[in-house]
Amino acid sequence: MVEVAGKRLEQYTMKRPQEVLIVTAEVEGEQDQIAIYKGFSSSLVRSTSFDPDIPVLPEGAKIINIDRVASPYNPDAPQYIQQGLSWETMQALLMEVGV
């Protein structure tokens, strides 16, 4: 389910390129933050594989919350659109853009 969630979040950012999603998730028992922008995902905490077939948000990961941030993303001064969205809340936004 989470792998599908990661793909849907990537598709969302392709349809809304003015947004960056910052996903806080628990991956293999450790907290991770993943930036998703224009269809690509990258971990802000762990190394990210060069192989695009290896999901950054792997199966079994637990999404804790999602922040919507205006692009371009500046980690020192992010411009939040919405903070702390649950996966359930984010799904409504995904449906709005058809993913």
Image (cartoon, helix red, strand yellow):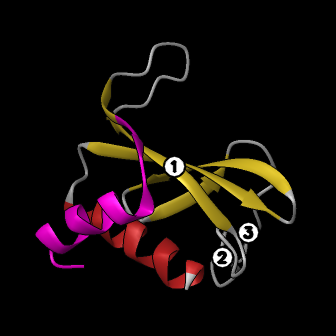
The Cα atoms of the two marked residues, 1 and 3, are separated by 25 Å
Res 44 quadrant in image: top right
Q: Amino acid at mark 3?
A: Phe
Residue depth check, mark 1 versus mark 3: number of the one nearer the observer: 1
As helix, strand or loop, the secondary structure at mark 1 comes to strand
User: Among all residues in the image, which is located at the extreme top?
Assistant: 77
The residue shown at (43%, 21%) is 78
Q: Residues within 10 Å of mark 1 (few under 14, many from 20)?
A: some
Q: Nearer the viewer, mark 2 or mark 1?
A: 1
Residue 80 is labelled as none
Quadrant where the C terminus lies? bottom left
What percent of the width, then of the height, locates residue 91?
30, 68
Magenta residues, as a range? 83-99
Q: Earlier in the sequence, mark 1 or mark 3?
A: 3
Query: Of the residues shown, which amino acid type is indicated by label 2?
Result: Pro
Q: Is residue 84 magenta?
A: yes
**Nearer the observer, disc 2 or disc 3?**
2
Residue designated by label 2: 55
Q: Quadrant of residue 10?
A: bottom left
Q: How many marks?
A: 3
Side (left or right) of 65 relative to 95: right
Q: Which residue is mark 3?
A: 50
Residue at 46% over, 13% down = 77
Secondary-structure class at tag 3: loop
Q: Earlier in the sequence, mark 2 or mark 3?
A: 3
Q: Residue sitting at 54 percent across and 23 percent down?
A: 75
Local packing at callout 3 (Cα closer than 10 Å; few below 14, some 14-19, many 20+) is few
Residue toward you, 82 or 86: 86
Q: Is residue 61 magenta?
A: no
